[in-house]
Amino acid sequence: MKFLALTISIFLISSATQGMDQLTFTTQDFGPFHMDSPAGVRGPVVDIVNKACDEQAINCRIQLFPWRRTLQLAQDGAVNGLFVVGRNPERESWLYFSGPIVATEYGFFVPLSDQKNYQRLEDFANFRVGVYGPSNTSRALSQIAQSLGSLTLEMAADDLDGFRKLNANRIQAVYSNKSVGIYTSSQLALTNVRYAYSDRKLLYYIGFVKSSTPKQLVNRFNEALASMYLRGELQDILLRQGLTPAKPSSVTEILYGQTGK
């Protein structure tokens, strides 16, 4: 009898889930925003995504892969969304965006043993600089290299490689997201790394694949994000992890990721 009751319960749960709208997200190991763990993908942005899905009764699944595969799955329309992402014109051609979630910045890390006061980009001329890519970060550094004309990029498939080399004085700097660099240095227990120069501010978003995701479903998700923001819950989740919530200029920007609908 107990077995029959359990079977019926599983059937009812499965049937209810099948009737719900669904979103499949893919992401990467990108602490402190989201990271792998024995219990699965975790982190403040994961918490935000899951809460938004729960509020709209959307059955959401989050998969973690290396960034290149994450990006390829999204570009192929094999998933509905990916996070966190910066915005650029190329991505806007194939992604819808949430409102801005996190305010962050890119900048240069140098060895702690290097105590120079870096005040302008020209101070990094002729440097060998590690960067994670291909990514928005490496794209930004490439622009810097073009403007300086004398900076060597050393691109790696993850953030760990560059920071290990920097700690060992094998390269002169790493260009990275500030929060990611601080988190990575802490996780690797690196003692010869410091943040030396803030280059640019940016915002992180959740992206939705236009070819595989109905706009109406994106709007519902963003409505949940807007409600969380207006209640202060989204901010609380980020602040508990030492991250800076984005400050949208209007409710319209929260809902649609832009100042106008």
Image (cartoon, helix red, strand yellow):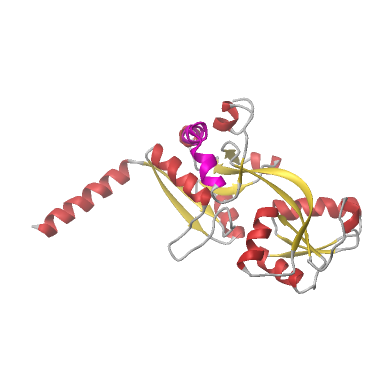
Residue lying farthest to the left in this orientation: 1
Q: Compare residues 37 and 96 and report the one nearer the observer.
A: 37
Report the front residue among 222 and 103.
103
Task: Decide whether residue 162 is among the magenta residues.
Answer: no
Magenta residues, start to end: 222-239
The residue depicted at 63 percent of the width and 69 percent of the height is 188
Quarter occupied by the C terminus:
top right
Give residue 232's position: percent from left, percent from top: 51, 36
Predominant secondary structure, magenta span: helix
Please provide percent x and percent y for residue 126.
91, 62
- Give the image location of residue 39, x and y in percent: 43, 62
On screen, 158 above or below 80? below
Quarter assignment of residue 86: top right
Whether 160 is drawn above or below 259: the answer is below
Left or right of 39, for residue 255: right
In which quadrant will I find the N terminus? bottom left
x and y percentages locating residue 41 in the rendered image: 48, 58
Residue 162 visible in image: yes
